[in-house]
Amino acid sequence: MNITVYPGSPYPLGATWDGEGVNFALYADNATGVELCLFNTTEDESESVKIKLNERTHQVWHAYLPEIKPGQLYGYRVYGPYEPSNGHRFNPSKLLIDPYAKAISGTIDWHDSLFGYELGGSEEDMEMSTLDSAPFIPFSVVVDPNYDWEGVKKPRIPYHKSIIYEAHVKGLTKLHPDIPEEIRGSYAAIGHPVTIKYLQELGITAIELMPVHHFITDRHLADNGLTNYWGYNSIGFFAPDVRYSSSGTLGEQVVEFKNMVKALHKAGIEVILDVVYNHTGEGNHMGPTLSFRGVDNSSYYRLMEEDKRFYMDYTGTGNTLNAMMPPVLRLIMDSLRYWILEMHVDGFRFDLAATLARELHEVDRLGSFFDIIHQDPVISQVKLIAEPWDIGEGGYLVGKFPPGWAEWNGKYRDCIRDYWRGEESTLGEFAERFTGSSDLYRDDFRRPTASINFITAHDGFTLNDLVSYNEKHNEANGEDNNDGESHNRSWNCGAEGPTEDKKIVELRNRQKRNFLTTLFLSQGVPMLVAGDEISRTQQGNNNAYCQDNEISWINWLTADKELLAFTQKIIDLRRNHPVFCRRRWFQGQPIKGLGVEDIAWFQPDGSEMTEERWNHDFAKSLGVFLNGRGLHSVGPKGEQIIDDSFYLIFNAHHEDVDYIIPEAKYGAQWTKILDTYHTEIKDEATTVEAGGNIRIGSRSVVLLHHPAGQLVTPK
């Protein structure tokens, strides 16, 4: 094959087709030489053409090939010193995935040649391997960037109106009987009308997809017949994973992903991606050489100062990307902009985001990463959600991310779990978490929407298992049940796992309703894990990261339809009443012109909560008045927003509690519209007068409603 080679340009990085040819550009600062390798088919074991890149502009090697078209398979071989102790692991025997590849042809076929050193050698990783890895590594793919979005615009839903649904592309649709079998588990299945209709009827506004960046399955998992199902092991930060493509055509996963996004946007649903920029799938110093390690190890990774052979590990995966280095920051920012501008996603959830904030060893919340995010006119305008912790010292940063960021609120999760399982905890913290965690976010001029509230997430028990198991049951993972969190703050309600005891089953169902009610009526942004609304179980496995099977997939045939109907109702309540999703903090003071607070807390006898009561560990019951007329907010056209008022009564006590409704100034007459004590949803209304008595069942929530026009204004 005769290939014409022009000098090309150092920008943009990656392989860029302009309609006439492809520009190839690779950052490799410490390399002494770079070869571009072209392949004809995915079955090729060696390249058909090797092209030495003679052009180098600063640290970028580049060339332009006029005859190359989308679909072309390629990789790189990079030359330089193999000196692990100095941080260099160049090895031209290893074909490398382009760090900027927009598509990757397939998955890794594990083989000793994928390692840069001689496996089993006496010098471990110090002796370079000369085995050619090309037959066993997937190829990078040139893609066509052109796509017709048909004028479909992003929904741009504000945080305070957002309801997030965390889902796995495969797990959500793999067993769905109403989706065509040939596309189940794919991007196409997420964008299918059946899935979209379900999401709309549920009432969510955004689907947060677990990692779709191309990832690898660790060799030890593959050898044990397992897989990295969750996908937190990225190797391609621009490439949608090929495993979720239904077509199997080279590069088609990019088009299929865009089709999915377009279909969701047409339905008014946003797409948020769970992204992993804190590490790669290459592991520690004994890991494989697949991409970054071979392109320029010392530039991409954080290495130990005393011996650059070893990696700093703030993630528990063996390595940490060096976000202090300009080329790594550029990679992350280029990736984010690509997914926003080219793939039209609406936001990101950053895995172990504290790692990205680390400058040297300490976490610096105003580090380079945040500075660049804030000044970027594209990235700063989408939803940015942090998992605000990593495993390093000082890495728990809940409430400490800068303005502009929302956070997974781990303190909300822990507090609400403790409250409903009857653990000793103060009502004061429960009130803080329910009202948006002002203790965490208010001082930085952030709003309640900085708190992403969740009871469960992909990592840990499902909602069903949270009320069904005291202990984790991870034996299927092959690690002797030593993996996964041991302190789950769960309660099995009297029996471990499945039971036919009707009283226990009834209590578990009630606890699910309690958790869901608390979640969706709390201030902040609620996040629901896919399947929790239909009682999905993982059989007690709280770390199903390697279970690509029925343990992780949603079984739609066993869906709990009663719980689904309840979840739809509670989400509908939230969406229709701004008082449950305020843009601003409660003030707790009388509102001008009304004389009634925007929020007030009460004891069972109808009197307001006292300081002593707030601090009692044994107090498990309280009521809260939410004044919808006191929102002090305006609509998009400047109109005053006036909502109904509500009175919520929480009872986590194991016995029934009699409640006296507060004085008439808070509402003369109330209508009960929700009671989690009951399995069925009743249409008939129960009314209660101010000063009247209402019995609240053990471990339940009651919601009373008061129309806006009936609020009694004191003289």
Image: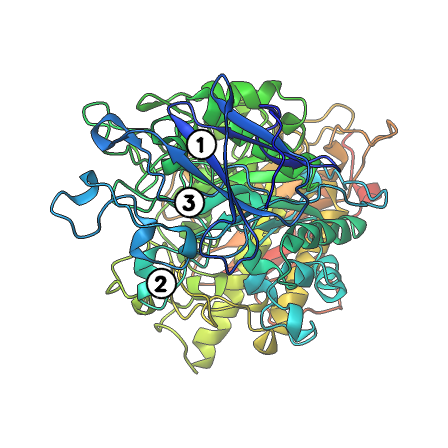
Q: Which residue is mark 1?
A: 34
Instruction: Point out which mark residue 222 bears.
Output: 2
Quadrant (top left/top right/bottom left/bottom right) for the C terminus: top right
Q: Residue at x 59, y 65 (%)?
A: 185
**Residue 18 appears at what percent x and percent y?**
72, 34
Within the image, what quadrant is residue 415 found in?
top left
**Residue 427 appears at what percent x and percent y?**
45, 42
Whether residue 531 appears in this view of the structure is no
| Few, some or many residues within 10 Å of mark 2 (<14, 14–19, 20+) | some
Q: Amino acid at mark 2?
A: Ala
The residues bearing labels 2 and 1 have C-alpha atoms spaced at a distance of 31 Å
The residues bearing labels 1 and 3 have C-alpha atoms spaced at a distance of 11 Å
Element class at badge 2: helix
Element class at badge 3: loop
Whether residue 210 appears in this view of the structure is yes
Q: Residue at x 32, y 44 (%)?
A: 283
Q: Amino acid at mark 1?
A: Val
Q: Amino acid at mark 3?
A: Leu
Q: Which residue is mark 3?
A: 95
